[in-house]
Amino acid sequence: MSYTSFYYYVMILLLLPIYYLVPLKHRWIVLLCGSSCFISQIMTNRFQIMIFVSSVLFGYLFGILLHKYSKIRASLKMVLLICGITASVLPLLFVKISDYFAPSTYINRLSFVIPVGLSFYSLQLIAYLIDIYECRIIPQTNPFKFALFISFFPQIIQGPIPRYAQLCDDLFNGNKYEPDNIVKGIQLIIWGFFLKFMIADKTAVIVNEVFDNYQAYAGIYVWFAAFLYSIQLYTDFLSCTTLAQGVAQLFGVNVTDNFNHPYFSKSIKEFWHRWHISLSTWLRDYIYIPLGGNRHGKSFKWLNISITFLLSGIWHGNGYSFLVWGLLHACYQILEDGRQLCIKKSKSGSSAFQLSKTFLLVMFGWIIFRAPTLKAAAELIKNMFSVFNPWILFDGSLFRLGLDHKEFFILVLSLMILLTVSFYQEKGIRIRDWILSQNIAVRWGIMLLAIWSIWIFGTYGYGFDVHNFIYGGF
C-alpha cells in the first residue's frame, strides 16, 4: 500500500464516515486503527513491526521518566535524555553506521528489517524527548495516543516531521465535520496527484536515462537532465507532502507546509528556509542552536553550520556523495555569510541574477545527490562543460530520451501550470480558495476536469509504472 494506491483511498473512504459518526472524544481511536492498518501493510515483516513498536515504546517510557524526574540534578537529567534518545533511535543509528562501515551485501540484507519511515519518525522521537527535557511540552500519558502521534498514517513515510505541540490537539481532541475540510482535502489530493503523475514521474523518464547512462551523454543533455531532476525531486516530494495534507484535512487535521516555493530563493540560506521546512527547522532547533548557533563569533558559527549540514547529508542517505552534498551546502552558506557570493540588491537586475545563481548552485548539488557514485557525479559535472551542443534543443534529439512529442508537450504544459500557481501563491493568492468560493457546479466541475486530465494524460495514461516517492528511501 502506498499514498498513490487504490487500496489506500479505499481505506480512507471506509475510515471517514466512521470517524465522523463516533463520539468526538473517541475519534482519535479511528485514526489509530487507520494508522495500524496502514503500518501493517507497509511494514512487510514482523521484524520491522517489532523495531517500530520498540522505538515507540522507548520514546513513550523515557518521555514519562524525563517529566517525572524533571527536578533531579541537571547532569543526571541529561544522562536520562541521552539514554532515551539512544534507545528510541538506536535502529536509525545502527543503519547509518552500517552504511559507512559494513559491506554492501550486509547492508542489502539489513534492509529487510528496516522499518519504512525510520528516518522520519526517529526525528519525531528525538524532538519529543528534547521538548520534554526543555519543559516545552508535557508528555502524553496515554501510550495509544502517543503511538498515534508517531504513526499518523498520512505523514509517517515522508513527513512532514511534526512536533508534538503542532499535532496533539487535532489528533486527540477530535474534529467536527466541516464540509469545507472535505473539499479542501480533495483539492490537495488532486494537486498532489497532478504533481506526481503529470510532472515528477514524467521527468523521471529522462532523468533516469541520462543519469543511469551518464557516460553516454554530455553537454546540454546533462544540463537538461540536471534541470529536470531539480524539478522531479521538488515535485515528487511536494506531491507526497500535499497528499499527506489533503488526507489529513479530510479528518480536520492540519499538517504543516513543508515547502514554500524554494526555487524562488535568492540565496542558499533562503533556499533552506523554503525547502523541506520541517527538516530545516528541526536541524536548526535541535542541532545548530544547541551547538551554539551564531553566538560565539563567525568561526564557531561556520563550524556549527558545517556540522549541521554534515548531519543533514548523513540523514539523507548512505555513501560519501551525501556527505559531500551536505558539506557543499555548508560551504555555500559560509561563502554567502562571508559576502563572497552576494550581490548588493541595489544593482540593476540583481534579483534575477540572485535567483538564477541560487538555482544553479542548488542544481549542481542535486547532481551529486542523484548520481550513482561520487565519481559519476564528478564525471557528469565535467561532461556538462566538455561538449557544446545547443542544437540538440532544436533537432529533436531530446525526444529520444524517453518522452515523445505529445508527452513532452504535456510535461511543458504541466510545468507552466505549476509555475503559474506558484507565482500566485508567492503573491499570497491561493487558486484553490477561489475554487472553493465558487458555486457547487463550478467547483466540482473544475475538480472533475482535473481528475479526468490526470487520469488520461498522467503517468497512468501513458502506461508507465508509478515511481516510488524519492524521499521515501531516506
Image: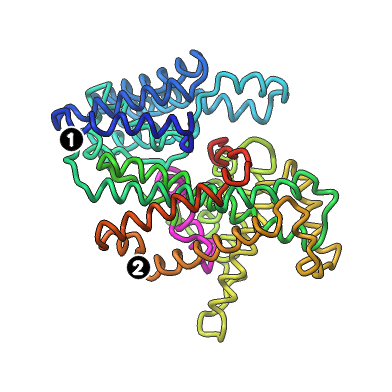
Among the two numbered marks 2 and 1 on one chain, the one whose residue lies closer to the N terminus: 1
Q: Residue at x 15, y 30 (%)?
A: 25
| SS at badge 1 | loop
Q: Is residue 461 above or below residue 354?
A: above
Question: Which label belongs to residue 173?
Answer: 1
Instruction: Please report the bounds of the magenta region as a residue range.
Output: 260-289
Q: Nearer the viewer, residue 380 or 406?
A: 406
Q: Residue at x 65, y 29 (%)?
A: 99
Identify the residue under disc 2: 428
Would residue 59 appear left or right of 143 to someone viewing this image?
Answer: right
Q: x, y (%) of residue 28?
A: 23, 29
Q: Is residue 367 above or below residue 470?
A: below
The amino acid marked with disc number 1 is: Asn
Would residue 20 appear left or right of 229 to someone viewing this image?
Answer: left
Q: Nearer the viewer, residue 103 or 376?
A: 376
Residue 282 falls inside the magenta stretch: yes
